[in-house]
Structure formats: C-alpha cells, structure tokens
Image (tube, rainbow, N blue to C red):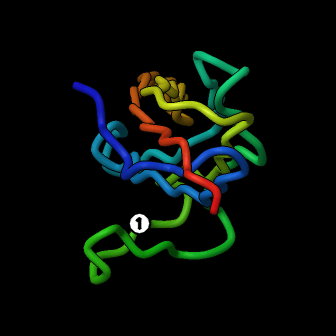
Amino acid sequence: MAYTFSALSSPNGVRDVQVDCSNKLEPLELISSVTVTSKDTTLLTISSPGIANTTVLTKDDGVSTIGVGKGVTFQVSSARAATADVEITVDITGNSNTRDVITIIQPIVKTITS
C-alpha cells in the first residue's frame, strides 16, 4: 500500500515531510537508519532525510504525536515544471533489525505563471 501526499506545485515547490513509522516497528524499537529516495530525480529531489530524534512531531491529524525515534523527516522539492506522480521510497531499519519500506506517491502539478 502506498501513501499519497497532497500535490506539490512545480517548478520550485518545496515541502517539509514527516512520516510516522511507529506501526512498522516493534513496541520498544526505535529507528536506527533511514534512506529516502525519489524514483525520478529529474522531477523530484529529496534532501535532509533523518530520524525524528530531537522533537516530538505532530501527526497529520493535528492532535496525535509521533514519538521520538519513531518518525522520519525529509524535504521534497520539485526540480522542474511537470505534471506527474513520483514515487518516493522510505527504507527504515530499527534497532532490533526490523526493516520495512514505505512507498509514498507525490503528485506534482505544473503551475501556470501569470
């Protein structure tokens, strides 16, 4: 199953992302490493992937929180004007050697300049 983000404008659209991975880990397990990859780097670039270790993040519902060490953060940027759905893979490994890959679809929409 893939998650789908809301559309990102192009060119020059930027979004900071946080992904809750707690359901991919054992109850007391924390993320020990993460790799985030765009399947089409000509359309979408990824920067600053990391484990949420310094702060508790708020989930998309605005109420629940993502526990420290249970989430991933990164930034996505549209690299050029285009309309497409780009696949992002988030590969996590937990400190108990749990490994999982999360697939995210990032729609990109070309903005009309005025």
Quadrant the N terminus occupies: top left
Residue 82, given in percent of the width and then of the height, sits at 58, 31
Q: Nearer the viewer, residue 39 or 21?
A: 39
Q: Nearer the viewer, residue 63 or 40?
A: 40
Q: Amino acid at mark 1?
A: Ile
Residue furthest to the bottom in view is 63
Residue furthest to the front in view is 114
Within 10 angstroms of label 1, few (less than 14), some, or many (20 or more) residues? many
Quadrant the C terminus occupies: bottom right
Question: Which secondary structure lies at badge 1?
Answer: strand
Residue 53 lies, with reference to residue 91, above or below; the image says below
Tell me: 91 left or right of 28. right
Residue name at image x 50 percent, y 54 percent: 71
Residue 84, given in percent of the width and then of the height, sits at 46, 27
Residue name at image x 54 percent, y 25 percent: 91
Residue 85, given in percent of the width and then of the height, sits at 42, 27
Residue 80 lies, with reference to residue 75, above or below; the image says above
Q: Nearer the viewer, residue 102 or 100?
A: 102
Residue 6 lies, with reference to residue 92, above or below; the image says below
Residue furthest to the top in view is 39
Residue ID for mark 1? 66
Q: Nearer the viewer, residue 42 or 10?
A: 10
Asked where in the image residue 54 lies, by quadrant, the reply is bottom right
Residue name at image x 69 percent, y 45 percent: 11
Residue name at image x 54 percent, y 42 percent: 110
Tell me: 80 left or right of 65. right
Q: How many marks?
A: 1
